[in-house]
Amino acid sequence: MAIQVTTTTTAVMGNTIRARFFLLAATGLVAIAVLVLAWPRFQAGFRYLPVDIAFKRHYRDQLIPTDRLPVLIDFAQQAIDRNDHYRYYDGLGLLHYLRGMDPYTPALERRPAYRLAESATITSLQQSPAQPGAWLRLATVRWVLHDEPATIIQAWKMSIFTSRTNASLLAQRVEMGLAHRQYMDDEAVAMLRDQLLLAWRAQQGSLVRVLARRDHDLAVTGELLVGTYPALLVEMEAWLEKLR
């Protein structure tokens, strides 16, 4: 009887040890699989870190040194090579755009830089369309390159569709809209009027400067507001008069 109990106990212990071994082995395999899948993302994030730091400084100081732009572009491309993520394409597009704008970039290199900005931004938007700033950058690049007005307005509209009330983009949208009013359909005109009203409430100072540059006599703005917001039009005229 004692021998039978001992044999049974040994068998149970053996099964328990095997079960623990298989559990540890399975856990190890899962951990290895997770590590293998996460490693490229970690590498990409590490490569992109200098770009993130540079952008934070840019948004604070509005400056990225000219000689840093090619280096940062290379970092962003290395991140993309390791992880094909929309955020890295968006950063690459912004860097090419800044290089195109940089006054120290050779004249013959500016147009290719803008085209590279366009390409990277389009790729980012294909992966993640809900990026109002990226859509507006795409419209801006096409405006700089004197592309067809329809392609500019299309991207401009998408910027508004994806975030109509984004305060940081209102003045720039109004400026671009005023410059392309003659090419707009009824829908785009209504969107421009809406952005103009939002900008007046949220960014009055920035909007007044835009109007002084783009519509100093309020010809286009008057067309948008006459009959619906006459008092607002008078107020805008008074603000512009202060700048003259």
Image: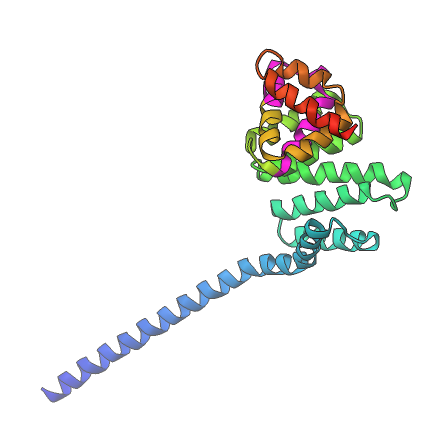
Left or right: 169, with 28 as reference point: right
User: Which secondary structure class fits the magenta region best?
Assistant: helix
**Magenta-colored span:** 168-193
Please tell me which residue is depicted at 64% across the width and 54% down the height of the picture. 82
**Relative to 173, is 28 above or below?**
below
Occupied quadrant, residue 205: top right
Left or right: 31, with 129 as reference point: left
Task: Tell whether position 187 is magenta.
Answer: yes
Residue 33 placement (x, y as % from top left): 49, 61
Which image quadrant: the C terminus? top right
Please tell me which residue is depicted at 66% across the width and 32% down the height of the picture. 171
Display colour scheme: rainbow
Residue nearest the viewer, comparing 43 with 12: 43
Residue 5 placement (x, y as % from top left): 14, 84
Please tell me which residue is depicted at 50% across the width and 65% down the height of the picture. 32
The residue at the far bottom in this view is 2
Residue 198 placement (x, y as % from top left): 58, 29
Please tell me which residue is depicted at 66% across the width and 55% down the height of the picture. 52
